[in-house]
Amino acid sequence: MSLTIPPKTQEQKQKTPSAKSTSFYGRLEKPNIEKVTFGKYEIRPWYGNPAYFNPYEGVPNMLGYDYSNMIAADPMSRKRLKSYSVEECFIDHLFVCEYCFKYSVNENEMLEHWEVCKYHRENPDVGAMVYYDRKRNHIIREVRGYEDPLFCQNLCLFGKLFLDDKSVYFNIDHFNFYVYYAKDGERDYVPMGFFSKEMIAYDATTNLACICVFPPFQRRHIGAMLIEFSYAIARLTQESSGPEIPLSPFGKVSYLNYWSKNLAKELLQRRSRTFTLEELSKATGYRKEDVLYTLEHMEVLIQEPNGEVTFSNDRFQEWVKSTKFDVIRQQPLLDTKSFYL
């Protein structure tokens, strides 16, 4: 599971791999695209994404769909696997449609597409609406991978530019994608982030596989809202759930912040300081192991001489004071009247 937080600058040099040793569906830490235009925003990718490009010899910066078109026009033009260097960017500029995530290196081509894009509407209609807050103009739409594969594939390709460990691009049949839309100023609704959920997960308690908030729209509490929505969906069928394990380093930071605030709110509302992990799990909907992990992170547990681990109210009050936590300021992220589940 991954969240989008800017990575530290990579100082170490990368070796020059071949297509045989570097997967076009895997991880490439060094950005291979200099900049991306997404609607009115110009963004510098945080990570590389080789899956945008064809893995065969020919023009070095040829995108995958350009290569497919070339082969369709001339089947004899098929090339061998190519070698490439990740020391330099493959292309200088990629243009991505802010409505359907289709992409091109040609700005005029993208402008022409933008005018006729079927997803370019005042109100989004991809997939099914599952959440609509009319007061805040927030919309979440559920898009099923097997029903709209091209949209979901392009969404994953774009998200990979800001995720360090996402490696699935085309095998999206068993995933649902929950796309967050809001108005960007006076403009139409635009997608600002998403999370995916595997419909047949190995761990039945998993409620989220991957989450990404696009850089121009961060610091708007969208990530916390999507996390809360993932729990709201899970509560329809199970008592407790959580994100796919293991969490990325940046995912840990975001989830621990989210879990800590909600557990603190629950603890402050309890009159009794005697409770079990099972009780906290049922009250919050979080898995017991996630509750324990968060309490350890908050440093509110102490080990008694007999080896028993107990909750320390004194330490909890220190945490409340040090973090300046105010339960009154903790406004609900979601409006229960806005659900269409």
Image: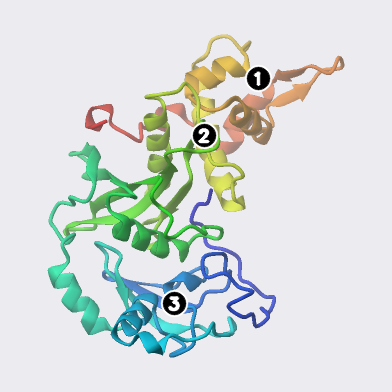
Q: Specify the amino acid type for callout 3.
A: Phe
Which is closer to the viewer, label 3 or label 1?
Answer: 3
Quadrant for residue 202, please give it.
top right
Where does label 2 land, which residue? 242
Q: Specify the amino acid type for callout 2.
A: Gly
Residue 248 point in image, percent of width and height: 59, 50
Tell me if 272 is positioned left or right of 235 in this view.
right
Tell me if 24 is positioned left or right of 228 in this view.
right
Distance of mark 2 from mark 3, alpha carbons? Answer: 34 Å
Q: Specify the amino acid type for callout 1.
A: Asn
Lower position in the chain sequence, tag 3 or tag 1? 3
Screen quadrant of the C terminus: top left
The vertical placement of 215 against 273, above or below, is below
Residue 10 point in image, percent of width and height: 63, 72
Query: Is residue 12 or residue 174 the one in the foreground?
Result: 174
Identified at 64% across, 74% down, the residue is 21
Residue 110 point in image, percent of width and height: 24, 77
> Around disc 1, counting alpha carbons within 10 Å, would you say few (fewer than 14), some (14 to 19), or many (20 or more)?
few
Which is closer to the viewer, label 2 or label 1?
Answer: 2
Where does label 3 land, which residue? 53
Residue 63 point in image, percent of width and height: 39, 79
Where does label 1 land, which residue? 313
Residue 20 can be seen in this image: yes
Distance of mark 2 from mark 1, alpha carbons? Answer: 26 Å
Label 1 secondary element: helix
> Around disc 3, counting alpha carbons within 10 Å, would you say few (fewer than 14), some (14 to 19), or many (20 or more)?
some
Label 3 secondary element: loop
